[in-house]
Image: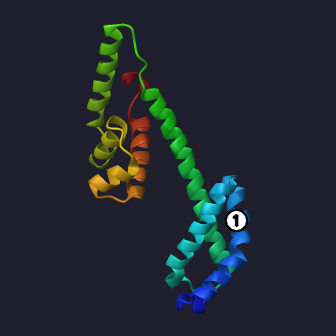
Amino acid sequence: MEKVKQGNQQALRMIIERYKGYLFKIIVNVVRDEAEAEDLTQETFIKMVDALPDYESKGFKTWISRIAYHKAIDAKRKRSRRHEELTEEFEWQSTPSDSAEDDWLQQQKQNKVVGSIQQLPQGYRGVVHAYYIEGKSYSSIAHEQRLAEKTVEMRLYRARKWMKNNWKEDEF
């Protein structure tokens, strides 16, 4: 590990070759997807290199296993949140209607939701509006609001939690 810390590429390759199968097994047991597990195994090694200055030369296998496990858990959580968001987005889609009254009611409902967004705590309003009303992606919101993408993701999560706790479904 000292050689890797000093930038020795051959030592890094040896570590990758030695542990890639072991880490892959850990990750695939969590995410249950071999293609995703391969990507996460590579990301684990990238994270390992980034975290090397913090490594205290104690229990390398445990240390790198923990990195892999946390990568897998994060990916699984992210996948479940995306599934939840896709479900929510599907519910927002309105079907074409035959009557002007239905269109007007749908517009009123959307206006009420936009107005309700103003009740959110200040830190959540911008990302909620950008994501749900304007339909922007995490990365574009992060870029526009000069935030980390993870911060956008967390604010949306917390905003949904706030809404569930503070709003009644029949209000809109």
- Which quarter of the picture shows residue 98? top left
Looking at the rendered image, the quarter that the C terminus falls into is top left
Tag 1: Cα neighbours inside 10 Å, few (<14), some, or many (≥20)? many
Using residue 31 as the reference point, say whether residue 7 is left or right of it: left
Q: Is residue 104 above or below residue 50?
A: above
Q: Is residue 144 visible?
A: yes
Q: Amino acid at mark 1?
A: Phe
Q: Is residue 156 above or below residue 68?
A: above
* Residue 70 position in % (x across, y down): 59, 63
Q: Is residue 121 visible?
A: no
* Residue 117 position in % (x across, y down): 30, 36
* Residue 7 position in % (x across, y down): 53, 89
- Which quarter of the picture shows residue 49? bottom right
For the point 54% across and 73% down, the residue is 46
For the point 69% across and 56% down, the residue is 34
* Residue 6 position in % (x across, y down): 53, 92
Q: Nearer the viewer, residue 81 or 117?
A: 81
Using residue 171 as the reference point, say whether residue 115 is left or right of it: left
Residue at mark 1: 24
Q: Nearer the viewer, residue 145 or 11?
A: 11
Using residue 93 as the reference point, say whether residue 119 is left or right of it: left
Q: Is residue 33 above or below residue 160?
A: below
Q: Is residue 10 above or below residue 26?
A: below
Q: What's the coloring here?
A: rainbow
For the point 41% across and 28% down, the residue is 168
SS type, badge 1: helix
Looking at the rendered image, the quarter that the N terminus falls into is bottom right
